Image (cartoon, rainbow, N blue to C red):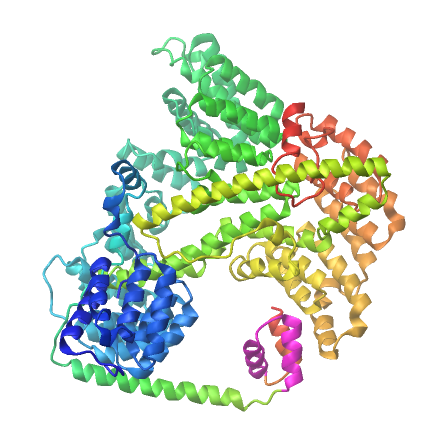
Amino acid sequence: MPSSNPLPPKENALFKRILKCYEQKQYKNGLKFAKQILSNPKYTEHGETLAMKGLTLNCLGRKEEAYEHVRRGLRNDLRSHVCWHVYGLLQRSDKKYDEAIKCYRNALKWEKDNIQILRDLSLLQIQMRDLEGYKDTRYQLLMLRPTQRASWIGYAMSFHLLEDYKNALNILETFLDQQQKGSNFDYEHSELLLYQNLVIQESGDLDEALHHLETNQNQIVDKLTFKDNLGQLHLKLKQFDRSSKYFKELVRRNPENTDCYKKLIQAMQITEPKDIVNFYLYYAKKYPRASPPKRLPLNYAEGDQFKTLVDAYMRKALSKGVPPLFVDLSSLYNDKSKVEIIEALLLQYVEALKKVGKYSESEVNNGPKEPASALLWVYFYLAQHYDYLNDSNKALNYIDDAIEHTPTLIELFVTKGRIYKHAGDPQKAYRWLEEAQALDTADRYINSKCAKYMLRADLVKEAEETCAKFTREGVSAMENLNEMQCMWFQTECALAFQRLGKYGEALKKCHEVDRHFSEIIEDQFDFHTYCMRKMTLRSYVGLLRLEDVLRGHPFYFKAARCAIEVYLHLFDEPLKDESAEQDILTENLAPSELKKLRNKQRKAKKKAEQESAQQREAQVKRDQHHKSRQQGDVEADAPQLDELIPDKLARVEDPLEQAIKFLYPLQRLSQNSIETHLMAFEVYYRKKKGLLMVQSLKRALKVDSKHPKLHSCLIRFNRFVAENKSTWDPSVQQVVAKESQPFFNGKDAKTLNKEFLTDHATSLRATLEGARMMYHLDEKCQSQALNLVTNIDNKYQDVNNEICTEILRSLKRGDFGSCDGETEEYVQRCQERFPFSAAYRPPCAADGPISGGGSNHASGNEENCNNSN
Amino acid sequence: MADEEVVNGTEEDLPEKLQKKIAKYDSGAADLERVTDYAEETEITTQDMANAISAIGDRRNKEALEKQAREKELMKVSIKKEDVDLIVQEMEISRTLAERTLREYHGNVVNALIELTN
């Protein structure tokens, strides 16, 4: 150790014990030894000891002291690798990975072959996916410690991750050659072999992979993976006989695994639907208790055969009482003829059950009657069936029949709520869910569903209170749900706030979800060492690959979309400065009114103060709770992030840049969703970045060139180019001209729009976009454009509540200029057509954002709604 | 060095009831903690380790040389600063990426931009 201040033997021994204690997590003892050294007057300022004391304090959750000690230690001994290393570890525990890497590099300057520092460095490199750097560090580790298993595997893996299969396999082979054949049941060795096989498969050499599996057969203990791999490899190599042999064995092993059946069908080269059905019927006889061979043939059977099969399938489930029968069969609803068969059967069941207690009247005399509950389940199924077909009336009739039959069944009330939800009335929907929830308050599933429906009805406070029945005591439900990374709740909250016009609150929720994803990515850190040690390499590689695309998850997409929409809205209509707003108000008031206003303001202020005092109290309580947790909790090291303050979030200076932060992960990981590129266009359209607009349009066209929303982007872009072209750099002009040629074929916006409207005359969704652009391009066409979208009765084939609501929103937003009269008429027409939907009903239920958005009080709107209903 | 994740000592000062509650909520924490346990690496010994190691070293050096040559080739392409500025400004990407793309397209800014809009 090149420390500038070496310790004498006695203290040195103590110092070594501090290190040992740290490794074994005996932090209290570590502090004791540190105290012993530091109490010696000669060594009160000993750098390395101070640093280690700080690190130990950090593990006990005393962050501030930790930083103070470590920094002081480093100042006293800048040439010590221990001090730099410790500083790096401290930074790392605060997730400041870049800083930590710098510290490690400094430490290595003073001791370039220190194994521990190299190892820690390699962990950060793999965490940050600096794969080249990781490879270099793993190389050094291998050179320094060729006798350790992890050195070899780490180096091989670094090549594997860089897709350099040749080198990866070379190193694995060299390493395995060195190893003696272990005992017969060595799980870790078996995993290593399977990992090696994975690398061979990824290198594309399937013959070799097959050979490798067969030669190592006796040492691989995971027989399931072994057989599955063999089956798949044979399949890929078109050796069908052998492949089907393995899949038959796997089906026998687990007759409930649908995947095995599907692969076996591939291996047996069965392609005709008829033969596939027979295949399943054979297995249904062979494994009478297994469910896949009963359900899967329904996907392939047709006509009478389908009728016979689905009849038997449904009867069994209805007699037994299988609540999710509809969910199970709903994937068949893509086929209209199957829907008709199912409907006819169910109607027959209802009649027969009512009359003779059987599924068919022709069976009166054979066998016992069906259980009384069968009729209930038929009603229940029919309600869901008609709901799926958008026939709310019939659906409600059947669900009411069911409720009359058995008024205590929770599922019925959930379904009734769902029918109202689909019909466009979130208020009624949530009330039925509340009913369901009241029937079993100990059921968390129902509780969560109820909360979700409340959020759909924009009742955030009520939803939180509902969730509070199950969250941890002593913390607010909102906070606990955040801590538990309960993303569905937070996303629904964000959407509710967005609808309520509380943009700051909405953004807060979106950012919270974003932070969960960051946290999940950080959580992988510990597994870099753990998986290497446990030799679970296949799962480890799987984990790394999952984390690489983590923000491609639908949960992230939903939250990011909400955030981007809100930021775009804030760019278009920034929140006004509160004080400025008031000045304008007061200027136009008479003195008496001014006095009233002042009184009102005083009262409001007082109320606000009381509320904030309450909040402060709650905060103190939370802090206490937090402290008590920290002492006994594992996660004392969670880094302190900036607090998310709704008002600040809603008043950012650069909403578009903030939107881009949410957009980037989508562009990288959700390329296949057209919405990603449409949102990108909206952002760059507002930023006036021609080339980036071209980029989003090109990508969108690749995903779905027929998407109606894409049309309005193209038209606006066409106009944008025509108006701005002259100001651009010549090379930009050239690129835009060349790349947008396929979009327009040299036509101008008006011609393009006209063509689009004629091409899509039967689609209301497309017509909406065309009509909007018609008005956008020429305001004189207002009445023509309005006519197109508000006459919903004729010629359109895709009229439904969702589109009509969107049209209403578009009318209200001013996409067609001022048109109050037409809007009113339109609303009336919709009301007749969609009697259940709340969107066309006057005052509260259908209202858009309340004024003064971004305020913190969760009251107003929601209370109004409650009272009036 | 496995750090972070603490629990020692302080728990005995908590009242028993509270402790029980924490145990209920945090069951599983113990398992999680084991993930960060410190473990000594086991050593393996063999005879031709040295040969294998030196072979790996040689291969690595050769690859490093090849890579250097590729990078050098790319650096030879001359590019204009204003082209890089334009790309950075229009496409909102980092300078390094802009330069690299421009070099890959032999300094042709139009082609580089087309590639970037894909």
The single residue placed furthest to the right in the displayed view is A780
Q: Quadrant of the C terminus of chain A?
A: top right
Depth check, front residue: A629 or A866 = A629
Does A750 appear above or below A626? below
Q: Quadrant of the N terminus of chain A?
A: bottom left
Which of the 4 quarters of the picture holds residue A428?
top right
Q: Which residue is located at x 64 percent, y 52 percent?
A: A650
Which of the 4 quarters of the picture holds residue A858?
top right
On screen, residue A252 versus residue A553, left or right, reads: left
On screen, residue A362 versus residue A156, left or right, reads: right
Q: Which residue is located at x 63 percent, y 32 percent?
A: A862
Total label count?
0
Does A270 appear above or below A728? above
Does residue B84 belong to the magenta stretch? yes
Region in magenta: B80-105
Residue A459 visible: yes
x then y, percent, for residue A325: 43, 29
Does A61 appear above or below A74? above
Which of the 4 quarters of the picture holds residue B76?
bottom right
x then y, percent, for residue A613: 55, 41
Residue A255 visible: no
On screen, residue A696 versus residue A786, left or right, reads: left
Depth check, front residue: A715 or A531 = A531
Does residue A312 belong to the magenta stretch? no
x then y, percent, for residue B15: 27, 39
x then y, percent, for residue A334: 54, 38
Secondary structure that dominates the magenta span: helix
Depth check, front residue: A269 or A49 = A49
